[in-house]
Image (cartoon, rainbow, N blue to C red):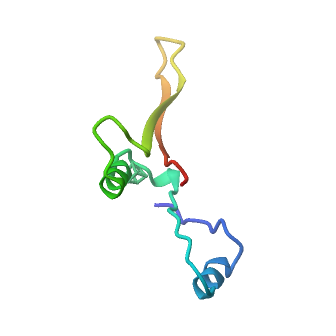
Amino acid sequence: MRESKPILPPGTLERSFKKKGPKQYTIWVDLEYCIGCHACTMACKAENNTPVGLDFNRVIEVEEGEFTNPKKKPNLGTYFVAMPCMH
Ligand code: SF4
């Protein structure tokens, strides 16, 4: 497993935890670790009580690569992109 690199400048999270006043929470998704399990979609549905067929959070599967020469091994890959509504 790779070592994750910080995206925010050092101390940013610590300062936000100490900040007075109303808190603003966020969800942080490192897409390199996403396995497409849709647990985030289910958690969002449970929290917002959305009806069947309405998902505020979606997870898409992206396929990439080429399969051009049938005599060669294809160079293909798949990854997942969690797409929260950002609200
Ligand atoms: S689908 Fe959602 S819960 Fe599952 S690994 Fe990806 S981001 Fe995390």
Front residue (pair 28, 64): 28
Front residue (pair 63, 47): 47
Q: Residue at x 47, y 39 (%)?
A: 79
Q: Residue at x 49, y 49 (%)?
A: 84
Q: Is residue 29 left or right of residue 50?
A: right
Specify the quadrant that holds the C terminus.
Answer: bottom right
Q: Residue at x 37, y 53 (%)?
A: 44
Front residue (pair 27, 77): 27
Q: Is residue 60 left or right of residue 65?
A: left
Q: Residue furthest right?
A: 9
Q: Is residue 65 left or right of residue 8?
A: left
- Number of marks drawn: 0
Specify the quadrant that holds the N terminus.
Answer: bottom left
Residue 18 position, x and y percent, is 60, 88
Residue 32 position, x and y percent, is 51, 51
Residue 63 position, x and y percent, is 48, 29
Q: Residue at x 65, y 84 (%)?
A: 15
Residue 38 position, x and y percent, is 34, 46
Front residue (pair 42, 4): 42
